[in-house]
Image (cartoon, rainbow, N blue to C red):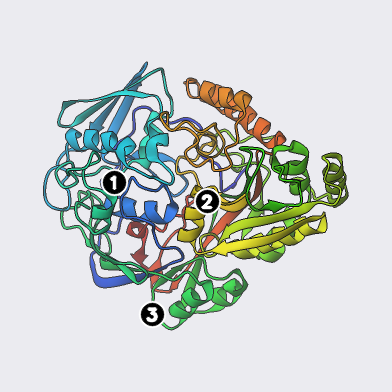
Amino acid sequence: MPGNPYRRPIAFKLLATLVVAGSAFSGTVFARDLVVALKTEPTSMDPQYHALTPNIQLSQTLFDPLVCVDADLAPEPCLAQSWTAEGKVWTFKLRPNVKFSDGSPMTSADVLFTMDRVPKVPNSPSSFKVYLQKVEKIEAPDPLTVRITTTEPYPLLAINMVGLPIMSAKAAAGAAPEGKTTTELNAGNGLVGTGPYKFVSWKRGSEIIFERNPNYWGKAPAWDKVIYRPISNPAARTAALLAGDVDLVEDPPTDDLERLKKDAKLRVETKASNRIIYVALDQNGETTPGITGTNDKNPLLDKRVREALSLAIDRSALVSRTMGGVASPAAQLLPYPMFGASKNLTTAAKPNPEKAKALLKEAGYPDGFTLVLGTPNGRYINDSKVAQTLAAMWTRIGVKTSIDANAPAVFFKNRDSYTYSAYLAGWGTATGEMSNTLNSLLVTPDKDKGLGTTNRSRYSNPEMDKLVAESANQMDDKARAATLAKASEIAMADFAMLPIHFEHSVWAMKKDVSFKGRADQQTMIQYAVPSK
């Protein structure tokens, strides 16, 4: 499949090749500020509180992980300049002479602190424990060596390190079990990293300011200061760009793209992403909120009902009309040929409303029922519009659907409180492989093991769980990919959740700014440079 935007190497190199420090960054320092309009304000500055793209893209500008990924999610050295695996033992060799933004040296002690803190962060809406699966012991033989022992051979250990930016043990120490609390970090207290920028201030709802880190180990990034302004309304973001108030915006309105592309003062960057937009369906118990007309039964426990809801969706029409073509219809939770995606699930099923109605009747709901669909308003591209489209499609088969749209922070609070029977959300995997997606969204929740960390539908399928667990022990890439693909097929045949589409991310910017898009959708401003 030449030119496929999702293609990436299946095999990771266990011994990474040393790259030139800071090669991704501009070598020229410009005395200029950059103003960026964010579509969603982060929920926290704590780099271990919430695995959410708006948070991650900022934390990975302040902090570096041991392993980074490029724009297409291929792994590359970062704070670890090389790594090897022998059986259950991984050894990471740290980059020498790296300093935190406060000038203190980064050593293996900081890596140990960072990983020890992860499970201690309370009330995490989407825990980073998912990246520490199978980890039994972490040691620091010397200041530049980290040795991680897993409970069994675990091929994903290195790529999982992408999700854990390294904190300063000195700066983030505190009286709480986790050291500095999330509240303290949100205020900037202890927010010290090795990344290209350092934290200055955060005025909620208004602006976030970063400045260039003078102690950065790589080449200096392009901008003196970066000012982030959260503007949730897409039209308002575009208006700010056209007025010259901001330099770069995330996801301008899909209806405006052609006009923006023709504007000689602007440039538009589009990138196919791995972010799946899906509908989660509550499968926890006999009763569920948000559904009426079922004699207090939870119809979503019935596979026939879940299949009917899926068959009611015309994904191609939704992508064309509601998304303006800035998406691809989805048949599973990760686009093929990314690692572990099934080659048998490359084409989304065609809608079949008549079969959907027949399935509802067979399940005992000939007259349908009433459903409330939860959705964020401003987190994903056209999210509330997509929810409205889904509601109309479901209403046509007798499932009379209304939507409950809220600002992202309110939506996630409701979701995490299990307020919704059904909700629309998205997931982008930073590791670019299926185990991260399944372990986070569909594996039976197990808080202690860091499994099912974002499984708010509380779906549980022992057969699928077994395959995902089995894949974690397969050091052979081909075998592991096949096992994950089978797990994906089982989940989709069970209509565990309903994949809708994969987003294509869009950035619009002034002509004198250049930013290449990323498959993980992150607006990592260290990769933005003045155009030549």
Of labels 1 and 2, the one closer to you: 2
Q: Which mark is residue 511?
A: none
Mark closest to the chain's N terminus, 1 or 2: 1
Q: Amino acid at mark 1?
A: Asp
Vertical position of residue 354 compared to residue 530: above or below: above
Left or right of 476 in this view: 531: left
On-image quarter of the N terminus: top right
Left or right of 331 in this view: 133: left
Residue positioned most to the front: 295
Residue displayed at 50% across by 79% down: 264
Residue 98 at x, y percent in the picture:
17, 44
Of labels 2 and 3, the one closer to you: 2
Vertical position of residue 266 compared to residue 197: above or below: below
| Nearest to the observer: residue 512 or residue 170 | 170
Residue 115 at x, y percent in the picture:
28, 35
Secondary structure beneath disc 2?
helix
| Nearest to the observer: residue 272 or residue 190 | 190
Q: Which mark is residue 415?
A: 2
Residue at label 1? 64
Marks 3/1: CA–CA distance: 30 Å
Mark closest to the chain's N terminus, 2 or 3: 3
Q: Amino acid at mark 2?
A: Arg
